[in-house]
Image (cartoon, coloured by chain):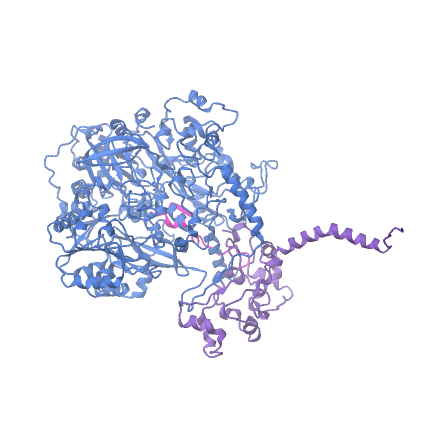
């Protein structure tokens, strides 16, 4: 098939109605789509009225090959059929259907351990540590191989029930969830290396013995860890200098508390008690070390029937430069440059004391209410409010925030301070700076690097790579042979955390244990084993951990602690702090405005949602999980606000060169509404050169762009005075306009059409209206098909039924789901959990751009309001499990059909790939295997990766359709187990003894806020039944009469009545982005 | 010269030839059609095993219960082939020098050299079968595996096709028996046993796609 034909399909395929669609549309469309105040939109491009959607789509299943420049896929329709024909012929010759299957071997264990049942999964408690904070986990193991991770529901601090009387629940972060992928990654280095050549661990042991003879001049550079065993070994290594470094560091908080209280203490908020929560550049939902707990506590006080009492809910204020998940959830969000936030918090602090803001940027109409109204609210909510500052905020901001919290009565009520385990530790940047100075000053003979990748992510002005190479003796312990390993003399492979013993503290300090679920696949030693080697007392990980904890006198029953995954009653001690000091701020000059001027642009550094700080660069799951806001995959970029983009002359989907402090980087630009004026955010973690086959190495192109080159000791979190220069076009793999359900039944899509359509998809109300108007229903009467009246076997011709097709009566279970938009933070945990549970393949950057991503859950993100101060809604969409499913009626082979429990089943082996079902799905939730995504698993080197597959879910082949099944494997597993337990004990007539909560879907288990609830509608007391009966509940596209089993709960916002509603000025958004 | 005249009896032959010519294609089609059916191809599949274990001896003659070796069948999706350790419970005393048992003794002594059995009862990879579900509904072992007690070398006794599965899922009554009769071989249902067990165990096998395909 030629490129011409492809084009033809894409751009002129509208049929006879619109012979010249472009002209036609342009005649009707205003140049700039006027957007009503409550209108929703997906991108700036769409707001400006020139999204591909409006000109080319018209309710098509897939967007046209978007972008004429893109090379036509080699697998065109024609040669697809050729291939199909050939394979059919082969199939005929071989008689696929009539042969025996491949010969299979059964290899039973020679001696089966007592607690192992072949064919069943078992969960073991363990823990995952990132940035010195442990996430307690339950790892699912099938016949000795870990296949899935979930949060540990028994952990005393980390988990609990949001709704009183329900089972304990624990969420999980995307990074923790995806970390299991590294266990089976064949790119992990398997051998010890010396000067880039393979060597042995014995030779390394000998080298360490030599090194041990003189430990002066030996330094350790360790990634952040809260492991008590590492701390104990560190004490054994007296005389060895210790440095700690993390590229994503929360040390500004420590430094801030030091300024305020004279010593480093750890603030932990109790969000469930807060009526007002203020975040200053602080993402409490994904980035904060306590994000999982904070999400849970936030959901508690966010619920109208939650911890604040019936009819009460918290209010979230966010002041931030980059749009974070917290900003997206906020009732009031102020976008403000990070370097202006000190002025802001200072003004807020003074306003609470009664002083008005000065005549400067703080008195701008856009900003002033955020000082005065917020101050009044904080005063009114004395003892019920908290202010939290983030990683990027300077120590001064943290100190002022401490003072603020003292003023509003937060201490002891909504905020507690805890003693840091290591209060004297130097900050990460200072520590690595000191190390480099010492190496340059010839004070260091040997450096032992534990984990991390400082050559890649240390501040660029330290030039760590050259410094490390100058050492005559250096060791790197790491899972992967990365940029740092390449500059070190010795490389020692580190075992994955699921292969080793370990300990760490969760954010509250509770000691959390990890146990190996599998013997190291490729050898390797753990951190504690390595350190014990250095201490001259090499021991097994288990012995080390156990003896450390026994030495602390906290062990009562070791086996019980290991089974639980934590040692109870070991949190950090509560700190008694004095009244905080305000830091000396000197002559702080307050700027007059926040107008962006090129040359004075602020650059902040953002955690990568894909690779964290670069360390997960070889993780394809994370790369393909779209960022919660930009919806970009497989890249990193700089986020620029529309006004800043205009001021600097840079464009969306174009390269940008950023110059600051004599350094420069070039990376793609993403213009995003809500990014603070004059501030751009550079997403870290791209451009790895020695990550592996996925992230980039000598033979494979890097994913993303190297951005650490701009990061310096002085400008570690943000740097000012940057200049932006636009460059050539570059297409980011954004799924923003993929799978668009908004165009569904509307033939002619205009911006008015979309504006009309969206409030039907996203329902919102305010707390005030919701309480005042007791008859308000999210679902309006006229669009609600009353299925109680017309239930049963009716069709359109009989008794006034609505459907053309027979409707089914359901006896027994009726599985259903409810998703609460009020508490969905858009953290993506459900998406990654689904990927892990359901063996969902990744397709890569190129195929994402071809609209072929496979993720079963997509999180639709809509903006509303003005592009300057947009509001955001997230809507996770998987299969809606329609009772009257349109997909089923069009399948020519009956591959998708209804179960008698109301599930829309998908039989992969029956599917012939017509894609009629996807075309007929109004929600666009079906995913087609265009190519054989799993072909790489046939490589010998990738065999090990197959161990990760969930054995209860089919691995799909090319040419079949797939979609969310409500985790049917879990439903059936629970039903079978339940029945086995009740054999011969059935009370007569009882349907089935499955209680509510017996089944948890993977997405539900991963959700930190319990926004996803799954259950049985036939049980009137189940949570899901109650939620479906709630007046906030609504179905998507009710006019199609699909009767979805998944219902959403309308989002409730809680704005302050004194904050005037924003007026929309779409004109502000029109410049600088096409 | 006198014309050769086929004798009268050849008329019968002519008919037979006609029948052969028209019937042969039909026969061939039938032959191939039947030849590739699961009944013809799968039933009787009898691969060699590394150890010539005789179910006829152990389950038949000696009368060992199936669940002595397949011990997890009531609580797991798999019946599970027993570990070598189970064999050694007896064979550390009985026939302890037998050459046939070398692989068992090797596995027992060196766990990284397990016995590699060949799967006989094989379902496609997209079919999810649970022993636990069937055993607890009281479907006898014999219903799917046949007269194991008479098999010196195990072979596949039933077609294991989807049609065959569904036939029982639609009407399980003839295949149910009291739980204590579960492992009995050559068992015939007593009067009303199927209905009784169906009611008692609440056996309502679903015929949804997702019952077996996930």
Name the residue: 44% across, 33% down.
Answer: A63
Give the magenta part as a residue range: A987-1013
Determine whether, in the image, residue A271 is placed left or right of residue A806: left
Q: Is residue A988 magenta?
A: yes
Q: Colour of chain A?
A: blue
Determine whether, in the image, residue A699 is placed left or right of residue B43: left
Residue A1000, visible in the rendered structure: no
Residue A384 spot, x, y in % from top left: 25, 43
Q: Is residue A55 above or below residue A508?
A: above
Q: Nearer the viewer, residue A296 or A543?
A: A543
Q: Nearer the viewer, residue A138 or B160?
A: B160
Number of numbered markers: 0
Residue A856 spot, x, y in % from top left: 43, 44
| Secondary structure mainly formed by the magenta segment | loop
Q: Is residue A743 above or below residue A184?
A: above
Most distant residue in the right direction: B2
Residue A601 spot, x, y in % from top left: 21, 32
Q: Quadrant of residue A897?
A: top right
Most distant residue in the top direction: A27
Q: Is residue A788 magenta?
A: no
Q: Nearer the viewer, residue A744 or B41?
A: B41
Residue A655 spot, x, y in % from top left: 29, 33
Q: Is residue A867 above or below residue B59?
A: above
Residue A353, visible in the rendered structure: yes
Q: Is residue A242 above or below residue A877?
A: below
Q: Which chain is purple?
A: B
Q: Quadrant of residue A850?
A: top left
């Amino acid at each position: 098939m030629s490129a011409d034909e492809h084009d033809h399909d894409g751009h002129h395929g509208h049929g006879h109605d619109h012979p010249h669609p472009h002209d036609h549309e342009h005649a009707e469309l205003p140049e700039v789509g006027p957007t009503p105040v409550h209108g929703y939109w997906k991108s700036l491009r769409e707001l400006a009225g020139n999204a591909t959607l409006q000109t080319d789509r018209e309710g098509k299943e897939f967007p046209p090959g978007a972008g004429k420049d893109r090379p036509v896929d080699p697998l065109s329709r024609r040669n697809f059929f050729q291939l199909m024909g050939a394979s059919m012929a082969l199939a005929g010759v071989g008689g696929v259907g009539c042969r025996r299957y491949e010969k299979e071997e059964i290899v039973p264990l020679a001696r089966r351990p007592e607690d192992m049942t072949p064919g069943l999964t078992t969960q073991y408690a363990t823990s995952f540590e990132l940035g010195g904070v442990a996430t307690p986990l339950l790892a699912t193991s099938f016949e000795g191989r870990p296949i899935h991770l979930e949060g540990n529901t028994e952990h005393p601090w980390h988990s609990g029930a949001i709704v009183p009387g329900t089972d304990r629940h624990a969420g999980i972060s995307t990074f923790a969830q995806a970390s299991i992928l590294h266990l089976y990654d064949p790119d992990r280095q398997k051998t010890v290396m010396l000067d880039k050549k393979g060597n042995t661990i014995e030779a390394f042991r000998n080298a360490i013995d030599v090194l041990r003879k003189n430990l002066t001049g030996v330094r350790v550079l360790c990634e952040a860890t809260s492991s008590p065993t590492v701390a104990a070994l560190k004490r054994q290594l007296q005389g060895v200098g210790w440095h700690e470094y993390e590229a994503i560091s929360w040390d500004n908080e420590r430094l801030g508390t030091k300024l305020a209280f004279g010593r480093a203490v750890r603030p932990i908020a109790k969000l469930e008690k807060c009526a007002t929560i203020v975040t200053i550049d602080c993402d409490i939902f994904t980035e904060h070390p306590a994000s999982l707990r904070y999400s849970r506590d936030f959901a508690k006080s966010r619920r109208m029937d939650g911890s604040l009492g019936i009819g009460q809910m918290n209010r979230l204020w966010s002041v931030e430069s980059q749009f974070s998940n917290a900003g997206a959830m906020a009732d009031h969000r102020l976008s403000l440059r990070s370097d202006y936030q000190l002025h802001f918090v200072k003004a807020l602090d003074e306003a609470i004391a009664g002083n008005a803001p000065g005549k400067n940027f703080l008195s701008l109409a856009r900003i002033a209410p955020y000082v005065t109204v917020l101050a009044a609210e904080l005063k009114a909510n004395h003892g019920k409010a908290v202010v939290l500052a983030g990683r990027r905020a300077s120590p001064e901001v943290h100190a002022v925030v401490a003072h603020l919290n003292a003023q509003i009565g937060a201490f002891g009520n909504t905020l507690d301070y805890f003693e840091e385990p290591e209060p004297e530790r130097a900050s990460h940047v200072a520590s690595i700076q000191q190390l480099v100075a010492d190496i340059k000053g010839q004070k260091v003979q040997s450096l032992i690097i534990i984990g991390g990748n400082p050559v890649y992510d240390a501040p660029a002005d330290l030039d760590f790579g050259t410094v490390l190479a100058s050492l005559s003796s250096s060791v790197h312990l790491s899972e992967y042979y990365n940029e740092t390993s390449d500059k070190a003399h010795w490389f020692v492979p580190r075992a994955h955390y699921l292969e080793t013993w370990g300990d760490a503290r969760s954010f509250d300090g509770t000691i959390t244990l990890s146990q190996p679920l599998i013997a190291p696949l490729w050898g390797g030693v753990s951190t504690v084993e390595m350190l014990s080697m250095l201490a001259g007392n090499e021991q097994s990980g288990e012995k080390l951990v156990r003896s450390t904890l026994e030495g602390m006198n906290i062990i009562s029953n070791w086996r019980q602690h290991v089974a639980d995954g934590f040692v109870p009653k070991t949190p950090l001690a509560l700190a008694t702090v004095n009244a905080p000091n305000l830091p000396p701020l000197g002559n702080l000059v307050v700027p007059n405005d926040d107008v962006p001027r090129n040359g004075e642009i602020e650059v902040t550094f953002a955690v990568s949602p894909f690779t964290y700080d670069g360390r997960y660069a070889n993780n394809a799951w994370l790369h393909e999980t779209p960022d919660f806001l930009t919806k970009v995959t497989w890249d990193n970029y700089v986020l620029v606000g529309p006004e800043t983009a205009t001021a600097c002359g840079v464009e969306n989907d174009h390269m940008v060169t950023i110059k600051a402090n004599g350094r420069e980087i070039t990376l793609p630009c993403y213009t995003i509404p809500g990014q603070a004026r004059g501030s751009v955010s550079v997403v870290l973690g791209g451009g790895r050169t020695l990550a592996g086959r996925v992230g980039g190495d000598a033979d494979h192109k890097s994913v993303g762009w190297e951005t650490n080159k701009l990061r310096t000791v002085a400008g570690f979190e943000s740097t000012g005075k940057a200049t932006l220069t636009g460059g050539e076009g570059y297409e980011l793999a954004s799924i923003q306009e993929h799978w668009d359900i908004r165009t569904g039944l509307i033939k002619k899509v205009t911006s008015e059409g979309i504006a009309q359509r969206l409030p039907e998809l996203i329902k919102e109300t305010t707390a005030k209206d919701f309480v005042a108007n007791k008859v308000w229903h999210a679902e309006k009467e006229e669009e609600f098909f009353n299925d109680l009246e017309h239930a049963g076997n009716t069709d359109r011709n009989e008794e006034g039924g609505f459907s053309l097709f027979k409707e089914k009566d359901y006896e027994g279970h009726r599985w259903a789901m409810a998703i609460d938009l009020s508490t969905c933070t858009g953290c993506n945990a459900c998406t990654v959990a689904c990927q892990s549970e359901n063996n969902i393949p990744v397709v890569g950057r190129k195929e994402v751009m071809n609209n072929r991503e496979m993720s079963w859950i997509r999180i639709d993100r809509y903006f509303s309001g003005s592009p300057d101060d947009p509001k955001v809604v997230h809507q996770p969409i998987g299969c809606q499990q329609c009772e009257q499913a349109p997909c089923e009626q069009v399948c020519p082979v009956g591959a998708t059909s209804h179960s008698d429990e109301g599930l829309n089943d998908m039989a992969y082996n029956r599917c012939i790939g017509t894609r009629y079902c996807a075309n007929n799905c109004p929600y666009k939730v079906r995913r087609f295997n265009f190519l054989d995504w799993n072909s790489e698993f046939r490589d010998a080197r990738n065999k090990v990766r197959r161990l990760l597959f969930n054995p209860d879910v089919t691995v799909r082949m090319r040419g079949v359709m797939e979609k969310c099944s409500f985790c049917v494997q879990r439903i059936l597993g629970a039903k079978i187990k339940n029945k086995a337990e009740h054999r011969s004990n059935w009370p007569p007539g009882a349907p089935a003894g499955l209680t509510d909560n017996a089944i948890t879907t993977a997405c539900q288990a991963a959700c930190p806020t319990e926004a996803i609830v799954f259950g049985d509608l036939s049980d009137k007391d189940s949570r899901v039944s109650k939620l479906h009966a709630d007046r906030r509940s609504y179905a998507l596209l009710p006019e199609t009469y699909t009767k979805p089993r998944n219902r959403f709960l309308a989002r409730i916002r809680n704005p302050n009545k004194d904050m005037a509603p924003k007026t929309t000025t779409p004109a502000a958004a029109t410049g600088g982005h096409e | 010269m006198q014309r050769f005249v086929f004798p009268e009896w050849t008329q019968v032959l002519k008919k037979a030839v006609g029948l052969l010519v028209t019937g042969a294609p039909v026969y061939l089609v039938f032959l191939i059609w039947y030849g590739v059916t699961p009944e013809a191809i799968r039933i009787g599949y009898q691969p060699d095993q590394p150890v010539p274990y005789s179910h006829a001896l152990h389950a038949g003659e000696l009368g060992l219960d199936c669940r002595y070796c397949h011990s997890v069948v009531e609580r797991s999706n798999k019946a599970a082939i027993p570990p070598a350790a189970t064999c050694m419970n007896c064979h550390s005393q009985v026939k302890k020098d037998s050459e046939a048992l070398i692989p068992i003794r090797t596995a027992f002594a060196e766990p990284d050299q397990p016995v590699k059995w060949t799967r006989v009862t094989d379902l496609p990879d997209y079919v999810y079968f649970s022993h636990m579900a069937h055993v607890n509904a009281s479907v006898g072992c014999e219903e799917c595996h046949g007269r194991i007690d008479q098999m010196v070398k195990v072979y596949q006794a039933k077609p294991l096709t989807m049609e065959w599965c569904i036939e029982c899922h639609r009407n399980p009554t003839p295949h149910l028996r009291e739980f204590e009769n579960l492992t009995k071989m050559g068992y015939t249902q007593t009067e009303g046993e199927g209905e009784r067990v169906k009611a008692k165990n609440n056996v309502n096998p679903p015929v949804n796609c997702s019952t077996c395909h996930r």
